[in-house]
Amino acid sequence: MSSKLWGGRFTQPTDKFVEEFTASIGFEQRLGRYDIQGSKAHAEMLGRQEIITTAEAEQIISGLDDILNDIEADKLEFSVALEDIHMNVEARLIERIGAVGGKLHTGRSRNDQVAVDIRLYLRDEIDTILSYLKKLESSLIQQAEIHLDVIMPGYTHLQTAQPVLYSHHMLAYREMIARDCSRLRDLRVRFNQMPLGAGALAGTPFPIDREWVAEQLGFDSVTRNSLDSVSDRDFAIEFCSFAGILMMHLSRLSEELILWSSADFDFIELSDSFCTGSSIMPQKKNPDVPELVRGKTGRVYGNLISLLTLMKSLPLAYNKDMQEDKEPLFDTIDTVKGSLKIFADMIAEMKVKGDNMRVAAARGFSTATDVADYCVRKGLPFRQAHEVVGKTVRYCVENGKEIPELSLAEFQIFSDLIEADIYDYVTLEASVNARKATGGTSREAVKRELNRLKSS
Ligand code: ARG
């Protein structure tokens, strides 16, 4: 292959390595069935448009079906020499049905082929992910329903702030998951356009029927510009952005579950099946699952940055760089699916220690704001009320008392506006249930929200 003196020793292994280096078949086998789905629609269209004969189209389609069966049965051997999934399938087709198989690629390029394959694949995965999100949402709603009477400390700065219902806390995560669902549905609509027909970059001179193919493959419409069709990876980036935000949400919940299952909080117990022990400390039950989900958030962010960086400054249209889109996208899909699946079950099986939550909620002067609001209702401007209660809390700290434990005389040291009915306002229940407006933590508001969710 080379006339250079060192050529005999060098060229062969180098060529082989280049082959391996440039091949994508090692990581894109999962596109096999979508590649065939796209090819079948394309072949049928070629037949309908009389670009090839109907008999040829039928032969190609049945050959593709055979290959699909082998792929599903894990019987197809993929070859690195054939570089990618598209050429692996096409070569097998020609091997099986003869030269007519070579007509499949008429009016098409691997550039528009890969664009359609990834879209079909991602669309399928998105539908699975949407169902997993729904399941997690149900687990959160179920937790909220079962534990409607549990009061826990609500925090700001991780310092006890005001008591809230545990149900309200769970429904906060439901809101995040619902927004994630909505983001995913939005991006699905945006990318559900059919790129075949863009050819390598400029379109094709054959009289193809793109609209028909789009309909066959369940796309809402066809893409409008061939250059963009083969070089757009926005949809993968949008998906990874969605995934990054979702994982950020899961990592926040993970962090709380990890804290809550520590001996110091002791608010929940995760089921044994989601934890592991320590090889040295016999007492340990480690919250591995939430820890791992928290950790995996990092790789999902990394994948998003990889894709953004991959696409940055690429000139139109297709560039081989874009083959690097797959591993970050696939890894993101696998990570998100795994995390959602395991979270839905873990949340459903988690044991809530309502009594401990309640004890913690009663600590830290959590009803101080309610005393201030009480003074406001008696006519004191809020700023002065804040001052009064600040002093009351300092008194509590110095005397080792919580607010509801103060006697009326003690309350009145700080304001003579305070009367015996103050005790109706400083219990955990009173504090929680006073917050009745939509979005508040009262039992009434949370129950209304649960009813709304059930009927929607
Ligand atoms: N394996 C390639 C990819 O994933 C398919 C497109 C190849 N096109 C080309 N002109 N080499 O991007």
Image (tube, rainbow, N blue to C red):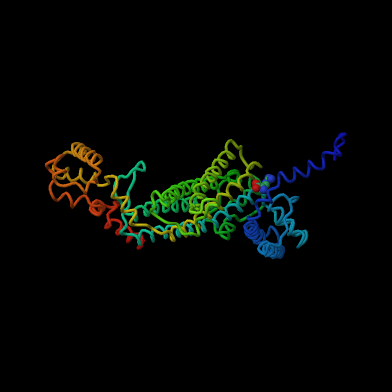
Is residue 376 depicted above or below 427 in this figure? Answer: above
Residue farthest top in this picture: 5
Is residue 314 depicted above or below 429 in this figure? Answer: above
**Residue 54 appears in which quarter of the rendering?**
bottom right
Residue 354 is left or right of residue 369, and the answer is right
- Going 32% across and 61% down the picture, which residue do you hit? 451
Q: Quadrant of the C terminus?
A: bottom left
Could you say where residue 117 lies in the image, as x and y percent from the top left?
61, 53
Residue 22 is left or right of residue 423, and the answer is right
Q: Quadrant of the N terminus?
A: top right
Could you say where residue 426 lies in the image, as x and y percent from the top left?
21, 49
- Going 16% across and 47% down the picture, which residue do you hit? 407
Could you say where residue 346 lies in the image, as x and y percent from the top left?
46, 58
Residue 182 is left or right of residue 310, and the answer is left
**Residue 123 appears in which quarter of the rendering?**
bottom right
- Going 20% across and 40% down the picture, which residue do you hit? 392
Could you say where residue 441 lies in the image, as x and y percent from the top left?
29, 52
Residue 415 is left or right of residue 287, and the answer is left
- Going 76% across and 43% down the picture, which residue do you hit? 17
